[in-house]
Image: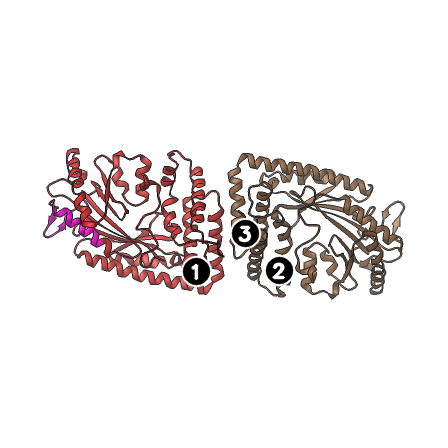
Chain colours: A brown, B red
Amino acid sequence: MPKFTTPQLSWLTTLGKEADIVLASRVRLARNLKNLPFPNRANINDLAQIKELIIRLIPAIESATGLKFDYLEIDKLTHLEQQVLVEKHLISKKLLTNPENRLLILSNDASVAIMVNEDDHLRIQCMASGLDLNTPLAKTFAIDDAIEAYLNIAFDEKMGYLTACPTNLGTGLRASVLLHLPALVMTQQLSKIVNISPQLGLAIRNFFGEDNAGNIFQIDNQLTLGFKEQELIDNLNSTVTEIISHEREARKALLNYSPDKLANRVWRSFGILKYARFISENEMLDLVSKVRLGVDLDIIDETKPELLNILLIASQKNYIQNLQQNENMTPQEIDKQRAHIIRKILQELAPDISMS
Amino acid sequence: MPKFTTPQLSWLTTLGKEADIVLASRVRLARNLKNLPFPNRANINDLAQIKELIIRLIPAIESATGLKFDYLEIDKLTHLEQQVLVEKHLISKKLLTNPENRLLILSNDASVAIMVNEDDHLRIQCMASGLDLNTPLAKTFAIDDAIEAYLNIAFDEKMGYLTACPTNLGTGLRASVLLHLPALVMTQQLSKIVNISPQLGLAIRNFFGEDNAGNIFQIDNQLTLGFKEQELIDNLNSTVTEIISHEREARKALLNYSPDKLANRVWRSFGILKYARFISENEMLDLVSKVRLGVDLDIIDETKPELLNILLIASQKNYIQNLQQNENMTPQEIDKQRAHIIRKILQELAPDISMS
């Protein structure tokens, strides 16, 4: 099934706006059906009913979005397939806890991923490459409208949309942007941005959970109540635009202050990526981040910017194990296979030298 | 003057015997003219006289060896040129202390280097690639004979050849072999060999003075008295042959025990050498040693074995500064230029891919 064996995601290309810094934008709406308990309190019959109600709406969702959809029953997937969906950020880990009657409704281009019976009955997630929150916002609204045309959604005039967790109450909206910020990390300016983000109602954190791994950060809104959706989006958008300009300045400073040192770090990273026979995930993230910075700053011409985007999926451990159809690979075997995959992708992304 | 701007030395190729492990063999004879004081006690007139006597013998040395010779007056060389000769191991540092009336008489293929007025009046040094002590021994004898045909040499029936330092008394012979022993170092077996060498009348030490830098070691005889020249050579030769077989076993063990780990170390070293923008001398030695091991074990096919031999000269700091005609390069500038030179040489040594 190509869902599980291709690292390509339509919303993780290098074609979007500000794509030298912003990897992807994402909007999700939390929705619940009226008069049915939230999934964590629902019994098996409720859950099955919710599932069936939603499956019947897929044609309506298709015509609202112009996209084709499949649905995946989570409990019918292998363990590795489940984990690959998590690695691709199409589902949360939580959806796997009780997989029965849980669904992922996924558009064929992977730009829309609707979780059924996670914390809420519906988590409508829409993604776009680069900095573009309005396209996913419009898509989530279109899907929400299509659903509300057939089903009653839990809504309170005062509170807005009702959700399982109070942090989602109101709009039920969470918008997030994935940023590659190597220069802010190298120049030790990122902490300032992290520190002021709560005052702006935003949170920024490393996407891979470890300090600065890959220099990739997710920023999203923490408030959902008391604002209109567009206000939340605009607020996030303007902060991200600020961060982008800081990152650009930091990149310029690195280039001006020590171009040779920067080139040395970038090219050494490229050399190791290209030739190593074992690479851990954290080392890969560190190296590919530096290489991507080098590509963005025209220091390196031996690969393309999408190297980073592809490797974010293609070199993750469950993806690798699923490709090998082997759930019991040792960490060493995974590191070896990761190095192999990286070399293959670098070859595919090498500039055409036949005419040089 | 190509002497100072080419890293190629005829005795440091990869064409000799056991060339996967033995870089070069060297024999030198210490000789002094009768009735003239040793250089450290000689006055300026003595030194000038010795110098003139030797210069007049160059035609005889040429016909004895079939080689063309030049002589370099050490005090007429620039500081960098002097240092390059030291880096190429054609002269000792000691020859530079009082450069006046000091000479290097050098064959055009650099396989014969005669120092005049170092510790002794004559230090006749002959070199060969790989393990081959007999060719240099025969050459030093031929030169010695040519000189003794015209000049009286200080010789004592009981003591043998008289030398400035008693450690050279007797034969005046020092034979040495330059070995690349990465596998013995990696498997931590080298210390055993170092420990037993004094019992064999031999000394082994790192060629670059630092612990294990480049995994290159020089082994030579410590005894000069009480043995015939051929006995000293044979003794050294048989110990070296032993060491070679230990190194080969250690290489096999590395290949058998952890081929992937070895490949990982080798290829990572290659990647850094190929792409780094700054490389220190010690890092270069470490990397090029691993790459050479990889080439010798058919792990790597993207470069040739002579990479190591060439870089031993071409990436040394005085050689680099002399190429740039700049004696005041900062360590950073040297590291940058070294990385540049390495990339250039790697390009020249790349396999021909036009037909692949």
Reply above or below: B321 against A93: above
Q: Which residues are magenta?
A: B137-166
Residue B149, position in %: x, y? 12, 47
Marks 3/2 same chain: yes
Disc 2 secondary structure class: helix
The answer to whether the residues at label 2 and label 1 have Cβ atoms under 8 Å apart is no
Q: Which residue lies under the disc numbered 2?
A: A320
* Mark 3 burial class by Cα count in 10 Å: few <14, some 14-19, many 20+: many
Q: Residue at x 32, y 48 (%)?
A: B9
Going from N to C along the chain, the mark reached first, 3 or 2, is 3
Q: Which residue lies under the disc numbered 1?
A: B298
- Looking at the image, residue A6 sits to the left or right of residue A33; the answer is left
**On-image quarter of the N terminus of chain B:** top left
Q: Which residue lies under the disc numbered 3?
A: A273
Residue A186, position in %: x, y? 58, 41
The answer to whether the residues at label 3 and label 2 have Cβ atoms under 8 Å apart is no
Chain at tag 3: A
Q: Decide which of B111, A327 is in the foreground and name it.
A: B111
The three-letter amino acid code for the residue at tag 2 is Ile
Q: Residue at x 43, y 62 (%)?
A: B254
Q: Is residue A249 magenta?
A: no
Marks 2/1 same chain: no
Residue A189, position in %: x, y? 62, 38
Disc 3 secondary structure class: helix
Q: Decide which of B30, A267 is in the foreground and name it.
A: A267
The three-letter amino acid code for the residue at tag 1 is Asp
- Looking at the image, residue A345 sits to the left or right of residue B25; the answer is right
| Separation of marks 1 and 3 at Cα, in angstroms | 21 Å
